[in-house]
Amino acid sequence: MSEEIKRYIRVDHAGEYGAERIYAGQLAVLGRGPKGDLLRHMLAQETVHKEAFEALMAERRARPTAMLPFWHVAGFALGAITAAMGEKAAMACTVAVEETIDAHYAAQRDALGVDEAGLAGTIEAFRLEELEHRDIGLENGAEQAPAYKLLSGLIRFGCKAAIRISERL
């Protein structure tokens, strides 16, 4: 098995773990409000994704990122802080994260060869669910969040940095 495939699995697991923590943070603040069911739906899908990558890590003998303890705290904090800013800011966070992951997953899918069609199919299925989350965010006022462009730009930058770090550590 190539180190590149192990790196894909490691970083994808880290991303799904982080997404799970973001939604947990948002639920801690907004879980009893009108967006609670939407957040629980997205969290449930992220949990399925994370568990699939955990199984792939075991099957393919890929190690998790050393950054998981940091992503545990950072993901929850990002979710809780954006939720505390309001429902639209929480949705802006969702849009920024999911658009970044869409591009990341598309690049991985396109780079995988025919001998990794199963992994490519898994990544594509998860990518489509991430796009569903982005659409939910847009439908729920993400672009009306205070300082939307700044907020989403900062979150995209952080996501891209987290991807690069998790690929290596």
Image (cartoon, helix red, strand yellow):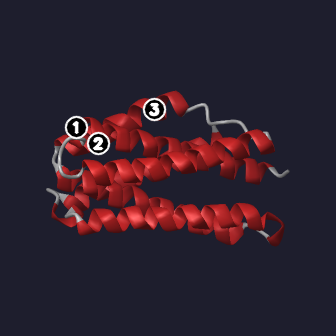
Which of marks 2 and 3 precedes in the sequence? 2
Check if mark 3's residue and mark 2's residue have beta carbons within 8 Å: no
Lateral position of residue 16 relative to residue 169, left or right: left
Q: Nearer the viewer, mark 3 or mark 2?
A: 2
Secondary structure beneath dot 2 equals helix
Lateral position of residue 108 relative to residue 116, left or right: left
Q: Position of residue 155 (x, y in %)?
A: 35, 51
Q: Nearer the viewer, mark 1 or mark 3?
A: 1
Which label was assigned to residue 26?
A: 2
Secondary structure beneath dot 3 equals helix
Q: Tell me, yes or no, if residue 164 can be seen here.
A: no
Q: Position of residue 79 (x, y in %)?
A: 31, 42
Reply above or below: 35 against 95: above
Which label was assigned to residue 127?
A: none
Q: Residue at x 65, y 67 (%)?
A: 109
| Count of numbered tags | 3
Check if mark 2's residue and mark 1's residue have beta carbons within 8 Å: yes
Q: Residue at x 32, y 50 (%)?
A: 39
Q: Residue at x 47, y 35 (%)?
A: 71
Check if mark 1's residue and mark 3's residue have beta carbons within 8 Å: no
Which label was assigned to residue 29?
A: 1
Q: Amino acid at mark 1?
A: Val
Q: Amino acid at mark 3?
A: His
Q: Position of residue 129 (x, y in %)?
A: 48, 63
Residue at mark 3 to residue at mark 2: CA–CA distance: 14 Å
Lateral position of residue 166 relative to residue 60, left or right: left
Q: Tell me, yes or no, if residue 141 can be seen here.
A: yes
Residue at mark 1 to residue at mark 3: CA–CA distance: 17 Å
Q: Residue at x 62, y 62 (%)?
A: 123
Residue carrying label 3: 72
Reply above or below: 6 against 107: above
